[in-house]
Amino acid sequence: MKFVDEAFIDISAGDGGAGCVSFRHEKYKEFGGPNGGDGGRGGHVFAVADPNLNTLVDYRFSRRHDAKRGEHGMGSDMFGAAGADITLKMPVGTIISDAETGEVLYELLKPGEVITIAKGGDGGFGNLRFKSAINRAPRQKTPGWPGDKKNLKLELKVLADVGLLGMPNAGKSTLITAISNARPRIADYPFTTLHPNLGVVRVGPEQSFVVADLPGLIEGASEGAGLGHLFLRHLQRTRLLLHVIDLAPFDEGVDTVAQAKAIVNELKKYDAALYAKPRWLVLNKLDMVPSDSRAALVKDFVKRLKFKGPVFEISALTREGCESLIRAVYAHLQALQLQAQEPEHIDPRFVNLDD
């Protein structure tokens, strides 16, 4: 299935049905009075977060979505039936915004979450509503109210705790295969990954986190070079970035430090908040480096990069070092969660003891 993370749709809730003007016409009921019913409301348009979906491809080719209008009111005190609602299934993580102004209207962040994105119009009043002691034979009615009509932009940002970034062929797909249940395509050439892959990493019973593997970034990605810039948005909801480095590139003339700096620079150009996220170094493919020169190679790389954060040495192919990496990641995520749950500090000088 083609991965699509952006689409535009036009939605229209149903209009309300019109009220009815009618009077009772029965034998021996010369002045039967009004009996015109109200119109039915128009159908609503709902959006539901479906955890079984991971792309917006259904809306790339199906742009128009209209709910049914409400039925008109009828005589004999009969109200019109409400129009049928429609429900649009969208992936978890979908952002719904106004296509014209860009204003974010809704976000689907929880599986099964249902929101009303367009409200159907209320039905009009029949003449039965206008009956009073001084108006015994009203002939008034009101038309139904129009339903909401919107032009929307759908944007999918995958919900992952950890994001993998790095140059093409750095071993990100091999790493996500080694630590999670994801099975992306792996090959010995660049740009094997063409769309984001999500994997669930199991640390222990009821202990897990979600990791996202994106297409490799190259210099100039923030301006549109390569494929990675198309999916950088999917890193914006992550809480930790793992910068995967290939310490044994095919071309010995490649400066891995310059490549690493270029990736960081692309993050900074694309989004300052993304650049500010916690970022760890994951030095990969150590199985291809002679054991007696690994320590010196790693030390020289970190020194030249001037990196101050955590550094992990792994081989995604042999899974060497992967266990310690995922346990450190899980501990970090747990610490962030606990920090978010801590109540804000309250200065005792401003506490009202009489409350």
Image: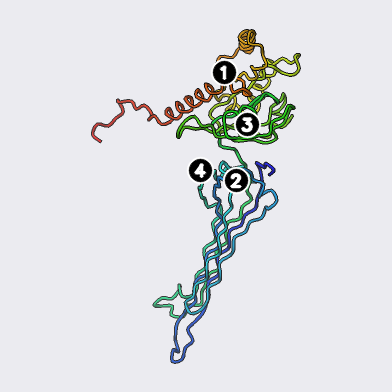
Q: Which numbered disc, 1 or 3, marks the residue that appears first in the sequence?
A: 3
Above or below, 121 against 179 in this view is below
Label 3 to label 2: alpha-carbon separation: 17 Å
Q: Which sits earlier in the primary sequence, circle 1 or circle 4?
A: 4
Amino acid type, residue under disc 1 in the picture: Phe
- In x, y percent, where is residue 80? 52, 71
Q: Position of residue 83 (x, y in %)?
A: 55, 65
CB contact under 8 Å: marks 3 and 2: no
Q: CA distance from mark 2 to mark 1?
A: 34 Å
Does label 2 or label 1 sit earlier along the sequence? 2
Query: Which amino acid, by three-letter code, is at mark 2?
Result: Leu
Q: Which of the image's four quarters has the C terminus?
A: top left
Task: Tell which circle, 3 or 2, labels the residue nearer the N-terminal end.
Answer: 2
Q: Quadrant location of residue 87? A: bottom right
Q: Which residue is mark 1?
A: 312
Tell which residue pokes out farthest to the left in this image.
354
Q: CA distance from mark 4 to mark 2?
A: 13 Å
Whether pointer 1 and pointer 3 mark residues with C-beta atoms closer than 8 Å, the reply is no
Amino acid type for the residue under numbered disc 4: Lys
Mark 2 lies on a secondary structure that is loop
Label 3: which residue?
213
The mark closer to the camera, 1 or 4, is 1
Q: Which residue is mark 2?
A: 53
Q: In this rendering, would 335 be left or right of 175?
A: left
Work out whether residue 304 or residue 32 is closer to the camera in this orientation and state it: 304
**Circle 4 sits in a helix, a strand or a loop, which is it?**
loop
228 or 116, which is in the foreground? Answer: 228
